[in-house]
Each structure stands twice: as C-alpha cells, then as structure tokens.
Image (cartoon, grey):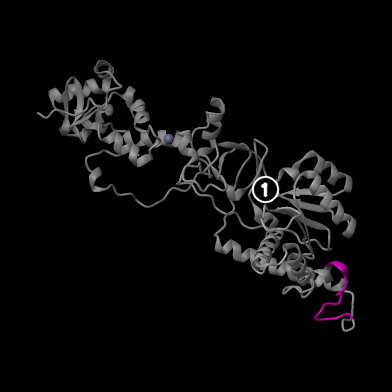
Amino acid sequence: MFEPILWVDLASLMKKEWVEETEKDQTLQLIKDRIIKGWSDKVKDVEETLRSYWNVRLELHVFNELVMRGERIVPPCKLWSKLVELAHEGHLGRSLTKNKLRATYWFPQMDSEVEKVVRDCWACAMSDKSHSTRKVPLSPVNIPVKPWDKLGLDILGPISHLGNKGQYMFVLVDYHSHWTMFKIVSQITTADAIKFLTEAFMREGIPSTLVTDNGVQFTSDNMKEFLKKWGVHHFRTALYNPKANGLVERMNRVMKECIQRARVSGMQSEVALNQMLWSYHTTPNTVTGLSPLQSLKGSQPGTKLNPNCLSGGEHVCEQRDVSAECFRKKQEKYVKWYNNKFGTKNKSWYVGQWVKVRLPRCTQGSDSKFSEPIKIKEVHRNVVRLQEGKVWSMDHIVPHRGRVDRCETGAAVMDNAEHSSGTLRRRESSRTWKAPQWHKDFVLLS
Ligand SMILES: [Zn+2]
C-alpha cells in the first residue's frame, strides 16, 4: 500500500485531534464499519448519511485510523469548515480554494462549503469580479422654460498654464441658454465660490436652482446659508455621476480643449477662453437656431460677421418656446440612443437592502473594487441615499449577497436572508454545466 503524503499540510492540526474527531464522528464510524463488512450493492440499501459516499465506496479505505479516499483524507464533519477556511487563506478565488482543498481532502459537500465561505468572506466581497454594475436608464433633466433659471456650477483644475491668476476655474452654465461664465482663481474655498456666484447673480440675476456636485465648497454650511439668503434651491448630483450635470461637464471639456490649443499657439489662456466663449455665445445652436446670447438677452448683438448695422436686433421671446421644444425633442432622441447603446435596465432597490458601491477611480489592481456592504436608507428616481448619508447613482451599486454580520448583529443577517430568495436575486444561468474531465473522481453537490 502507498504512503499518503499528508502530514506536511497538516502541521497545524495534531494527528491525535484527527483520530479523536474521526472516532467521534458517527458517519465516519459507519463508513469504517462498511469498509470492513462490505457495502450494499444498491444505494437505497445504505443509511441515508452514507449515500453521498456510496459512489466512491470502492476508493474508501482506512489508513492510520483515518478514513481515506485514495490518497485524500475524508475529514470528520466538524472540521469541514475549518479546513475550508484554511484553504481560503490568502483569499484565493473559488476555483483555487477548491483545488487547494482537493489536493489533500475529500468530503461530499466540499464544493458547496467553499462557495459558501467565499461568498461570505468580507475581503472577497469587496473585490468581487463577478459582480458588475449596470447602467440605469437615463432620465432627462427638465429644461427650464426661461433663461438664467437653472444654473450648473463646477470647478475645473488644477490646470497648469492657466496664467498667474491661479490654477483653478469656476464654470457656471445656464441650462436654458447655455450661456457660460468662468473665473480663474487660485483657491477654491467656499468663500471663493460665494464671491464668484455673487458677481454672477448681480450681473445676470438670481436663478431659482443651482446644480453642483458634492465638492466640500458646495456642501459647506456657509454655502447653504448663502444660497438660502438668495432664495436659490441647491440641487446636488449623486456622487461620481457627472452625467447628472452633463451640460457643465460638456462645457468643461470644451474649455479644456481651448486651454490646450492656447498653450500650443502660445496664447494667454484667459484671452483664448474669452474669445472662444464670445464665439460660442454668438453662434446659433444647431438644434434651436438661437445663439446663447439671443436666448439670454433676447436679441442678437452685432458680431464681426454680422455687424449691428446689418442685424435687425429683433426680439426672440416667442422663439424661446420653439427652442425649448427643439431641445426636448433632441433630448428624447439622445435618451433613446443612450438606453439602447448601454442596454440600461431599471433595477428595483428597496430601503434596508444591503448593497455594495463600485468604488470610482479604482485603477490600481490592488484597490478594492467595491465598498463594504451598506444599507440603503432612501430610494429616489435614479439615486439612492445610503446609511452613511451619501447619495449614489444606481449605476454605482450592486446587491450584496453574502453575510452582513460584520457590521450588525444577527438581526441583520436574517434581514438580508429574508430577501435573498426574492426577485432581486441575480438571475442564475440556465445553461447546464458539464464537469471537466479532471473532476471525474469528485462528487459534486450543489
Ligand atoms: Zn476571501
């Protein structure tokens, strides 16, 4: 008989402990008995606990008081989870954990035990590559009916070659007319943002809504107080969801390109930006036929191409309605295209559900792909507010399917389990899975 090469891997577990546990294990004792007395020819004739061993009965034998299947140990039931945990050390994936275990041990529920341990492993849940987020359908932002009613504010920078005034820019865009203002600054504190907004409001009027991201300068108490004083409703976009402030993001891109061109041609960035904006403001929009300047000020001023003496200076108030309608149509078309291209899907999230957040800007291979599991506090149209208070776009979250008891008590585990069999569970593939050749000597139980 061959000498099994086992004891190297088992250094951490005393042999005495093994023999003791094997003797205490009723199933293993029954197997030992069968090995001596012989197995029944029919599976239905053996005890229920032994049925999962019946297929491999011819390979089972006793060596050093332990039950073996070929060269592998059949461990007592009590040690199964401990062995799986040891095999998962270093957070190997499902397949590698199984392979590691298979090299030395065999027991009937081995695969499902591994699946369970990996699924419940906190570290693995945070870097789960099998999970992918799916884009939610784009819901169009309402275009304000009048100019300077809804504005988007953003910060660009740091950008080198912006001049001596600073490395940052505040960019303010009107959602209706696309009229854009900018200011180069050296600092981007709340006070700087307030100064910029005050100048803009005093020049063009007070809007009813201001859209920003969650930058600290926009979420501070001082900013809240300032906007409240001016009667401006503050709308903050979900975290890392720039498309919610799409117009500003697009303008940012145009401005960055302009700065790059200025650098190449040796022009001052601020001068180049002003030139570009003037040109943009006086050019009719391809969709509406109105220039931002016309939309905002009501008439088209003279330009180099169309001097005052030639332009009629007619009012465009009536045209505004037409232009808003044109925008809506274009927007509808874009939403349709976007939803088609990305195969967006409406997912149903519910308050109290455990989810993980796909962490943005995760470029390092070693970074966690997902946050720790966290509960949903509020569900809105396309965003959710999580328990820690942050708002995320639904594009960024995935359901958490494993255990949650690391941050909460047993109640939370049950809470999650309650929903795990509901409609929110990921659809399992209906493809039948065929075991590879090398699996042939293993009994796979789901
Ligand atoms: Zn793990």
Residue name at image x 24 percent, y 23 percent: 28
Q: In which quadrant of the rendered view does residue 278 lie?
A: bottom right
Residue 164 image position (x, y, % from top left)? 74, 55
Measured along the vertical axis of the image, is residue 290 above or below residue 235? below
Looking at the image, residue 378 sits to the left or right of residue 421; the answer is: right
Looking at the image, residue 234 sits to the left or right of residue 256; the answer is: right
The residue to which callout 1 is attached is 238
> Quick check: is 307 in the magenta stretch?
yes
Q: Which residues are magenta?
A: 296-308
Q: In which quadrant of the rendered view does residue 303 lie?
A: bottom right
Residue 11 image position (x, y, % from top left)? 27, 23
Residue name at image x 20 percent, y 22 percent: 66
Count every numbered label the image shows and give the total: 1
Measured along the vertical axis of the image, is residue 421 above or below residue 339? above
Looking at the image, residue 11 sits to the left or right of residue 299; the answer is: left
Where is the N terminus found, in terms of image quarters? Answer: top left
| Ligand 1 quadrant assignment | top left
